[in-house]
Amino acid sequence: MSDSVRSTQDYLPLTPVVFAILLALADGDKHGYAIMLEARQHIPMGPGTLYGALDRMMAGGLIVETGVTDDERRRYYRLTALGTRALAAETGRLEQAVKRARGKGVRAAGVRA
Amino acid sequence: MSQDSGKTTLMLRLYGLALRLYPAAFRERYAAEMREAARREQAEGHAGFGVGLAWDTAQSLLREHRRAAAAGRPVYVMLFAMFCSVLLLGVYVLNQQILRRGADEQPGQIAAVVRAEMAHGADASVVLSGPKQELSSPEWLAGASAFGAVYDADGKVVASDATLWGEPPQPPRGIFPVIRERGSEKVTWQPQRGIRVALTGLPLPGGGYVLAGQSLIPGETRTARFSALMRWVWVGMLAGCVVVLVWLRARARAPLRG
C-alpha cells in the first residue's frame, strides 16, 4: 500500500518503542546500533526489541532501509514520508496530553530524558 | 584472560546460540546485526549488559515467533475455505446421488415382481390390473406412486397400469436392446419438460421387457431445497473467512500502535 493511501491515524497512538525509533531517525539516516543508543534515552531497548520493531516498521511503511555496509553488519534506515507524518502526529498527540497534564498542575519528575 | 572478559565472551557465545532460535527469515536478515550490536554494547561496558540482553532476547523471541505464526494465518483461512468448499460440494453430490438412487428402488422392486410373476405363467394384463395412473397428472408427478408396463420383443406395449396423455407409456425404443444386452437398465426418462421419470427395465424370459417408473419431481424438489441450503452455508462460510482475513489484516498493524 502506498504512503498516500495509508493514514497516520492507522498507527496512532504509537508504541513507545516505535516513537523512540522514529525520533532517533528524525535527524537523518542511522544504522541499528546508533538508533538503539539514541532510543535508549527514552526507553530500555535491546537488539531483539530494536530489530523486531525495525522489521515491523518497514513492513508498515514507516521507515525504509537505505544501505548496508560491505560486511553486511550495519544496515542504515530512514524515515519515509508516512513515518515523518506519524512522528509529527504522535508528537502533537503527546503535546496535547502534556498540556492537559500541566493544566491540572502535574509536573514532570524522574524521567529518563 | 581476566574473569570478566571470559564471562562476556561466554555471554556473546550464548547470545549467538540464542539467535538461532529466532524464526529463519528474521534470523537470516538480522542475526549478524544483532550480534554486532551486542558485541559493541559489551565492548562499551554498558551496565547490566548480560541481564538486559537475556531479558530482551527472551521477550523478542516470543514476539517474533508469535508474529511468524500470525503471518501464516491468512493462508490457513484460505485453506480452510477451500477445504469447506470441497466438503460442501461433496455433501451436495452425495445427497443428490442418494436421492436419485432412492427413486430407483420402488421401480426396481415392481419390475422384479412383475418379471417373477410372468416367469410363473401369469398374464401381463392380470399382473398390471390396478387402476390406471396418468403420468402427466400433477398428483402422480408430485407423489411417490410407481407404475409398471410390459412390452413385447419389439418394444410395443402389451399391458400397463398407467397412461401418458391417455395412451400407454412408450419410452424410446432404443432402451430395449440395452436392457437385453446388460440384463437391466436404469435411466431418467423425460417425455416433456416437467415430466421426469426414474425408469428401471428388466428383460422377460419370453423376449419381452418390463419397465417400472416413479416421478423424479419430489426427489428433485428436495435436492433443490438442499442445494439452496448448501449455497447459503457456503456463502456464510466465505463471508466468515473474509471477516477473519480483514480482522487479521487490521491486527497486523497493531504492533506499531500503543
Image (cartoon, coloured by chain):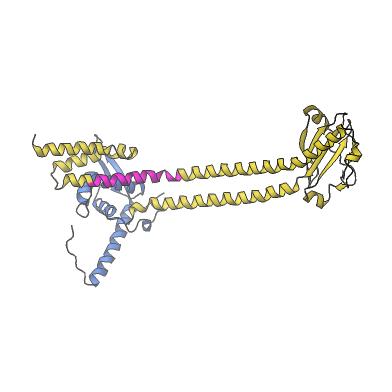
Furthest toward the front, the residue is: B120
Q: Residue at x 24, y 72 (%)?
A: A104
Furthest toward the top, the residue is: B181
Whether residue B174 can be seen here: no
Q: Which residue is drawn at 32% across and 40% down?
A: B26
Predominant secondary structure, magenta span:
helix
- Left or right of B43: which side holds B192? right
Q: In this view, does B139 lie above or below B176?
A: below
Q: Percent from the top left, x then y, of residue B244?
A: 47, 51
Q: In this view, does A40 lie above or below B82?
A: below
- Left or right of B28: which side holds B193? right
Q: Based on the displayed image, in which of its 4 quarters is residue B28 positioned?
A: top left
Q: In this view, does A87 lie above or below B116?
A: below
Q: Based on the displayed image, in which of its 4 quarters is residue B112 positioned?
A: top right
Whether residue A86 can be seen here: yes
Q: How many labels does the image show?
A: 0
Q: Percent from the top left, x then y, of residue B250?
A: 41, 53
Q: In which quarter of the image is the C terminus of chain B?
A: bottom left
Asked whether B160 falls inside the magenta stretch, the response is no
Q: Colour of chain B?
A: yellow
Q: Colour of chain A?
A: blue
Furthest toward the left, the residue is: B2
Q: Percent from the top left, x then y, of residue A111?
A: 18, 60
Asked whether B70 falls inside the magenta stretch, the response is yes
Q: Residue at x 64, y 51 (%)?
A: B228
Q: Percent from the top left, x then y, of residue B118?
A: 87, 34
Looking at the rendering, the stretch of residues picked out in magenta corresponds to B55-74
Q: Quadrant of the N terminus of chain B?
A: top left
Q: Which residue is drawn at 30% across and 63% down?
A: A93
- Left or right of B146: which side holds A15? left
